[in-house]
Image (cartoon, grey):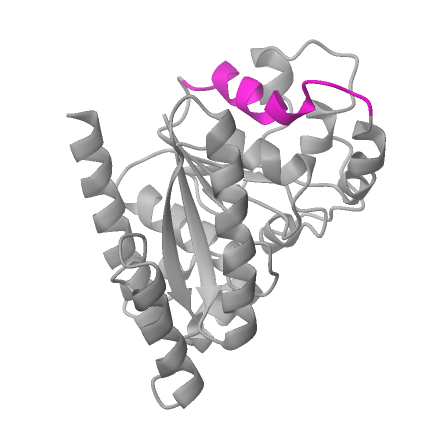
């Protein structure tokens, strides 16, 4: 089972879109996929029609439950989505209180990694949607991940957020036995604007070894898929956004094969 986390310390850069689109493409080629929503805003959860305010069971239970963290408990948190090969551990708004509760408690940074080990035989891939804040939830995502995907909107302020994210990755890697590799994904690219063109050029200059050759354009069909509650490739497999993510996926799968060999 491969675990990919999607994270950036800036909101609005396309994290949830990246999770959903990549999950749909993985499912379409036959992989079973589990999504984990660690963002208190619950955008991924809402995408598939669940209300983070109404759920009785959610990912929050991994951090605040008297139940043993075993296979049965973890599976009880998993819900179906609109795609039969994609399941999800939804978020709850109560996640927003976790930082305060985590003060003084040790070991909470590994709860997601421990939980995923319980169901590793059930899924080929896990994709984690992370909050845009460095705290116990993002630490859980990074600790569980085999690879990190960092969507970056091609504009100036997003570049500043990327700098903070890269510093966080370096900090996390000092505590890991195996280096966490990451791929930067340029998003919301509009070649008609000088801001997008300059930002993409700057990304290639600063991070030549980490930036993806796949550039995700601004594409209203990605937004339309979220309104419909389906993965983008199911709504329109020929859209420019889906094609960009498909190119990214091919690159990641090839890299995974090379690492395994």
Residue 66 sits in quarter = top right
The residue under the point 49% across, 17% down is 117
Residue 57 sits in quarter = top right
- Residue 78, position in %: x, y? 59, 30
Residue 237 shows up from this direction: no
Q: Does the magenta stretch include residue 146?
A: no
Q: Nearer the viewer, residue 123 or 141?
A: 141
Q: Which of 56 and 61 is in front in this view?
A: 61
Q: Give the range drawn in magenta.
A: 104-120
The residue under the point 50% across, 71% down is 224
Is 72 drawn above or below residue 199 in the view shown? Answer: above
Q: Is residue 100 left or right of residue 14?
A: right
- Residue 95, position in %: x, y? 76, 39
- The majority secondary structure of the magenta stretch comes to helix
- Residue 171, position in %: x, y? 53, 37
- Residue 161, position in %: x, y? 56, 61
The residue under the point 81% across, 40% down is 94
């Amino acid at each position: 089972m491969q675990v990919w986390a999607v994270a950036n310390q800036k909101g609005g850069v396309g994290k949830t879109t990246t999770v959903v689109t990549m999950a749909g493409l993985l499912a379409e080629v036959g992989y079973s996929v589990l999504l984990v929503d660690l963002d208190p805003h619950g955008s991924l959860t809402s995408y598939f029609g669940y209300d983070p305010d109404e759920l009785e069971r959610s990912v929050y239970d991994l951090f605040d439950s008297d139940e043993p963290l075993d296979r049965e408990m973890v599976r009880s948190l998993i819900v179906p989505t609109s795609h039969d090969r994609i399941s999800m551990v939804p978020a709850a708004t109560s996640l927003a209180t976790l930082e305060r509760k985590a003060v003084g408690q040790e070991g909470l940074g590994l709860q997601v990694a421990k939980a995923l080990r319980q169901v590793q035989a059930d899924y080929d891939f896990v994709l984690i949607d992370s909050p845009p804040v460095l705290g116990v939830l993002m630490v859980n995502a990074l600790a569980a991940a085999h690879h990190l995907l960092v969507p970056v909107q091609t504009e100036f302020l997003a570049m500043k957020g990327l700098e903070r994210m890269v510093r966080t990755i370096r900090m996390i890697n000092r505590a890991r036995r195996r280096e966490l590799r990451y791929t930067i994904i340029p998003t919301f690219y509009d070649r008609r604007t000088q801001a997008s063109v300059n930002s993409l050029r700057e990304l290639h200059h600063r991070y030549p070894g980490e930036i993806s050759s796949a550039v995700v354009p601004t594409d209203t069909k990605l937004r339309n898929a979220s309104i419909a509650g389906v993965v983008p490739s199911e709504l329109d497999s020929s859209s420019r956004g889906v094609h960009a993510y498909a190119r990214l996926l091919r690159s990641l799968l090839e890299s995974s094969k090379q690492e395994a060999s």
